[in-house]
Image (tube, helix red, strand yellow):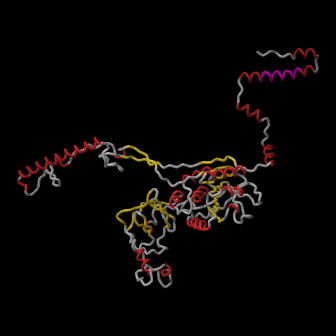
Amino acid sequence: MPSPFISPSSVSQPDDLAILHLRRDLLIPTILQTHDDEDLGYEEGKVTNTRFGSFPHSTLLGKPWGSQIVASVVDTGSRGRRRLSKKPGNDTRHLKRKADELDSPGISDEAKPLLKPAIAASSGFIHLLHPTPESWTASLPHRTQVVYTPDYSYILHRLRVRPGSTIIEAGAGSGSFTHAAARAVFDGYPIEQPATKKRCLGRVYSFEFHTQRVEKISKEIEQHRLGGLVEVTHRDVYNDGFLLGNPKTGASPNANAVFLDLPAPWQALKHLVRESPSGPRSPLDPSSPVHICTFSPCLEQAQRTISTLRQQSWLSISMVEVHHKRIEVRREGYGLDSGSLRGGTMFPKSVDEAISKLLVAEDRAKQFREAQIVQKESLEATPDYKTGENEDCDTKSGLPDKFATVSSSQSQVPSVLQGRLVHRTEPELKTHTSYLVFAVLPCSWSEADEQRCRQSWPSGNLTAQIEEMVTPKSKKELKREAYAERQRQKAQQQQQKTAAGSPQQGKQELEPKKYN
């Protein structure tokens, strides 16, 4: 089946990974399932509880990605009662049947309890999104320091990773870079069409030393259906290198991009060479240049890595530090008339505005008192005073029509254009200080390759040809060269004639003419 990270379906389906978007910096990953495997006791089945309400998975399945899902009314206290009832001596009559009891042959499908339909709550909602490497990075469970989107997007760009590339990753960690690299190298699934010479399928070979991290990331790769693109290997790359299978006799990945997120990347560089002195084949692609990037948190590590890269014949070495800022742009209004503006602050901008507001309020209060006196006198003079019916008065406020609505100066400018446009830089962003070291290892070039190249493309007088192409000659120089060429041809003709004629006559005819 295709991975939801690469080819998501149009609607959410069971056993799919979904991202619950609560707000921009708060995302929750979950596996969509109707029945709860943990058996927490919800009558609605599996439920995800958030700060904006509870959401049964029955309300999330079959929905188009990007839909807004309203929270449901769920009895969250049932979890505590269920744990209490499981203790020895407590009544277990109201417990939900276990999955193994429901699936037993003695119980038919009709006898199984049905899920309680979800009832929409009065408030609270989320958005249902399909997973992407960016959303997965923002929501994944942290096992190590995460390579965030600002870093891995630049790294993949500098490594020239494209569909069909093969990349080696050492230090899988939480799997953030692994998912991004799998999407970058994707060029088809091996099951659909086997790799051929004309079409190379991209692969990500990830190496991790920690046993528990290998187990967790392997489980995540299987759940996300990326097994055909990513291969996770448990290995110490410092000592065993990057070959597949057996570290000594295994196959070569033929990688053309390498990313090292290791505490000491310089110790692994001895295996990333064209011809290893220890004997095993090289893990690099022999037919293309190889780009490498190392991820180091301090300058001392970057300095030692650069020194080792120079010793191993890597070229174009450079170090980069990525700084990322997110700027929020919105309209902000201050003043007593900013009530209709979203995000407006209804406080006076200055003392003058506050005084003018007080004067207006005092004038309206004076008009209100005068209107009450006029109303009372008019009502006493009318015969229907006792019934309280008067067409000229507002029955709610008791004011005449001319005082019921007080005119206010409202601007004709739309609310979206009111206020001033401001921008703010977020003080905190999910990133960390890191130094990226980039380098390129060119293809190996032997003397035999040099000789074949010279035979296929002879150089000749290459220097003169380049000078002629770069610096064009003037008309005067071209005339002189043409005159010299004609004189040379005449001289050759005269020499041929003198061989048959008198030497004196040939000497006179060979005298050159002066050129003006």
* In this picture, residue 313 sits left or right of residue 216: right
* In this picture, residue 88 sits left or right of residue 133: left
Q: How many marks?
A: 0
Q: Which residue is found at the position 10% from the left and 56% from the top?
A: 388
Vertical placement of residue 112 versus 333, above or below: below
Q: Is residue 489 magenta?
A: yes
Q: Which residues are magenta?
A: 481-494
Q: Position of residue 470 (x, y in %)?
A: 70, 32
Q: Is residue 117 magenta?
A: no
- Residue farthest toward the front in the current orientation of the protein: 300
Quarter of the figure with the C terminus: top right
Vertical placement of residue 409 versus 125, above or below: above
Q: Which residue is found at the position 94% from the left and 17% from the top?
A: 503
Q: Position of residue 12 (x, y in %)?
A: 48, 64
Quadrant of the image occupied by residue 480: top right
Q: Position of residue 327 (x, y in %)?
A: 46, 48
Front one among 38 and 286: 38
Quadrant of the image occupied by residue 58: bottom left
Q: Which residue is found at the position 80% from the left and 43% from the top?
A: 454
Front one among 330 and 84: 84
**Principal secondary structure, stretch drawn in magenta:** helix
Task: Using the rendered image of the protein, determine whether residue 335 is visible from the camera's viewpoint.
Answer: yes
Q: Which residue is found at the position 65% from the left and 66% from the top?
A: 234
Quadrant of the image occupied by residue 72: bottom left
Quarter of the figure with the N terminus: bottom right
Task: Using the rendered image of the protein, determine whether residue 242 is visible from the camera's viewpoint.
Answer: no
Front one among 365 and 162: 365
